[in-house]
Image (cartoon, helix red, strand yellow):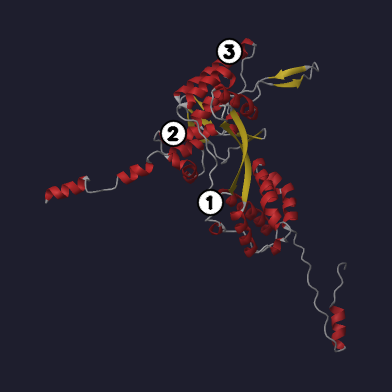
Amino acid sequence: MYGKPTLRPQIEARLKLGQAALPEEKPENTSPTLKDYFDGIKKTHLAMAVRESTAESYEMNFRVHILPELGDLLLNEITRERIKEFVGHLTKKEHSHTVKVKTANVDGNTVVEEKTITKPYSKITIRIILAELCAVLNHAKEAGHISENPATQLSKFYKRAKIVHENIEPLTIEEVPFFLTVAKREAPQYYELFLTALHTGMRSGELAALRWHDLDEHGKFIRVQKNISHGKITETKTGKARRVDVSDELFRALLDLRRRRQAEYLARGKNEIPEWVFLGPGRIEKDRETGGLKRAEGKRIDIRNVKNYAFHKCLTKAGLRRIRFHDLRHTYATLLLMQGESPAYVRDQLGHSSIKITVDIYGHWIPGANRQAVNRLPGINSHAAMSAVAAD
């Protein structure tokens, strides 16, 4: 039998001679470090079992936050106390980013300056980091490297972390028609895209993945079923399809777009139009038959190019501040809430996984909500009080 030689004969011989037994050999610690284990499952489990965007989140959070603190520890050396220390480190950690600020100098000219903003990580960010660490340690537990996961149920240790919301800069109710007017003049090929973003709150990847059969003409709604991420068709962010109501203005604009496209393709001798609602101008590709270059039409839109060029161009031409394309989604949500729509309706339209997310992000955009509530409290002039006095 091959294998490591046993010490039993030596121990028995020493006992016969009245000598002390040899100390028992300690088993080697064969547990990998957290860094080595993560590098291993990154190429297998994360590459196959999760979406690309989720895998990128794991990659970034482990590289930036987790591995610098815990990466050199063996898996079975990561204790509950060490995890608590790590949570404390995250709650105190800050990050910086640079923004461009436009100001007017004494001559009235616009000056663009860069400003560095430093702020702590939000409670949501910390929760995501710890959830990903917990998931990797669960995987290690299933593989038999550890008997218990020390990273479970950690929320109570970061509950006092600050709630840091992303900077939301929606367009106002007066700015929306002004932006759309300029967009129709300066970038008419993207007008329906901008209108859909403003009237549905769909994410940019969902807009890119929108197909004509997703539009229900009878119910006047859109079935949001797919998303485009890194050029690939994926499920929606929540993994669930949803129904989004379509305004009459948007409905007419989409039907008109389809009629124009059908007429255009019919004039070329083509009976069918591409399935995608929003098309790009077409990439320049090599023609396999002639070897020359041709414009490949009928391809779905590249939202990144639209964001970087047409969208910001329209904002500049309209004299509006520079915002992100994602702020069109925020514009949709804030305007609905300011017009009195319920947070539950806005949640369903946006596709948030819970109403808490909707309220956390947009709660302060609900006008007069608190005053309406306190004004409903009974007082001396309430009907019941007046009736009681009258009865006496």
Position of residue 189 relative to residue 79, above or below, is above
Amino acid type shown at disc 2: Leu
Give the residue furthest to the bottom: 18
Amino acid type shown at disc 3: Ala
Residue depicted at x 61% and y 54%: 90
Kindly tell me whether residue 114 is visible in this rendering. Answer: yes
From the image, state whether disc 2 or disc 3 is nearer to you.
Answer: 2
Residue at which label 3 appears: 263
Expressed as whole percent of the image width and height from the top left, the position of residue 310 reads 61, 24
The quarter of the displayed image where residue 339 is located? top left
Residue 337 located left or right of residue 4: left
Position of residue 163 relative to residue 297, above or below, is below
Residue at which label 2 appears: 336
**Do the CB atoms of the residues marked 2 and 1 lie less than 8 Å apart?**
no
Residue depicted at x 55% and y 17%: 185
**Label 2 to label 3: alpha-carbon separation:** 35 Å
The quarter of the displayed image where residue 32 is located? bottom right
On residue 205, which mark appears? none
Expressed as whole percent of the image width and height from the top left, the position of residue 175 reads 48, 26
Residue depicted at x 57% and y 27%: 107
Amino acid type shown at disc 1: Lys
Residue depicted at x 41% and y 36%: 341
On residue 162, which mark appears? 1
